[in-house]
Amino acid sequence: MLSTHLCAQPRFLESSLQRVARRSWTSTPSPAAAPAPAVVCAMFRTRVCSAAVGVNSTLSCSAAAVSDDATCPFAADSSPAAATQAQERRLSAPGKAAAVTGAYITIAGLAVFVCPALLRLIFSASACTSLGTGWTRVLATLAAAFGTYYLGSAIAEWSGEAAPLAFYRSTVFGRLFIAAAFAALYLSGDVREVGIVLLGAVNAAGALAMHLALQTSETR
């Protein structure tokens, strides 16, 4: 009857044994004195056979019957490395904002570097001509480089490193400065181009998005 009951409720048994294993592993003062999760698996390992063919379930209490830790549910759940891996490949809200910013700045910089004429999409032809192809590509190179800073930070966080919050916060002030400087250039008449206002607005919006993302991340 015991084997029939175990076969009918394998999930209940497995969850119960997992709780026992975790408690014994975490409540022992010395980790070295605590039974390893693999040993717990060996002591409580359950073989659940198909009830359709009438095969009874049995408990194996032999340590030799346990397989490697990769197939042990207790070892996978209680390992510190597993907890670290569970946090890997996740982006915080600021990380997502940085990834978006880095992607479009890098792509725009590379595109203008390859085809400087694309700059005429936001600036007048006379402005682009006076700037020249060489200096246009210099600015495009700087834009692409700035984009990689954002992308690199987001990729590092996605790979499991700590979120570079100091860098994310600094981008808020940096982009607000760009927006203010571009507005001042336009209002002073030094750069009478609507494109400069557009770029300033994009940077202001990006700074606001990062600021909100930082606030969301800090309240969690």
Image (cartoon, helix red, strand yellow):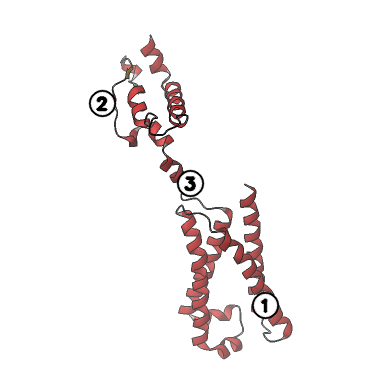
Q: Amino acid at mark 1?
A: Ala
Q: Residue at x 57, y 58 (%)?
A: 165
Residue tagged 1: 181
Residue 98 visible in the picture: yes
Front-lying residue, 212 or 44: 44
Cα distance between the residues tagged 3 and 1: 39 Å
Which image quarter: residue 43? top left
- Name the residue that disc number 3 marks: 87
Give the secondary structure at mark 1.
Answer: helix
For mark 2, give the secondary structure: helix
Determine the image quadrant of residue 204: bottom right
The answer to whether the residues at label 2 and label 1 have Cβ atoms under 8 Å apart is: no
Check if mark 3's residue and mark 1's residue have beta carbons within 8 Å.
Answer: no
The mark lying in front, picked from 2 and 3, is: 2
Q: Is residue 43 left or right of residue 138?
A: left
Residue assigned mark 2: 64
Q: Tags 2 and 3 in contact by the CB under 8 Å rule? A: no
Q: Residue furthest bottom?
A: 130
Q: Nearer the viewer, residue 124 or 172?
A: 172
Give amino acid for label 2: Ala
Give the residue at the far top of this rendering.
Answer: 1
Which one is in front in this view, the residue at disc 2 or the one at disc 1?
A: 2
Badge 3: how crowded within 10 Å, few (<14), some, or many (20+)?
Answer: few
Badge 3 amino acid: Gln
Which is nearer the eye, 54 or 109? Answer: 109
Disc 2 to disc 3, C-alpha distance: 33 Å
**Quarter containing the N terminus:** top left
Q: Which numbered disc, 3 or 1, marks the residue that appears first in the sequence?
A: 3
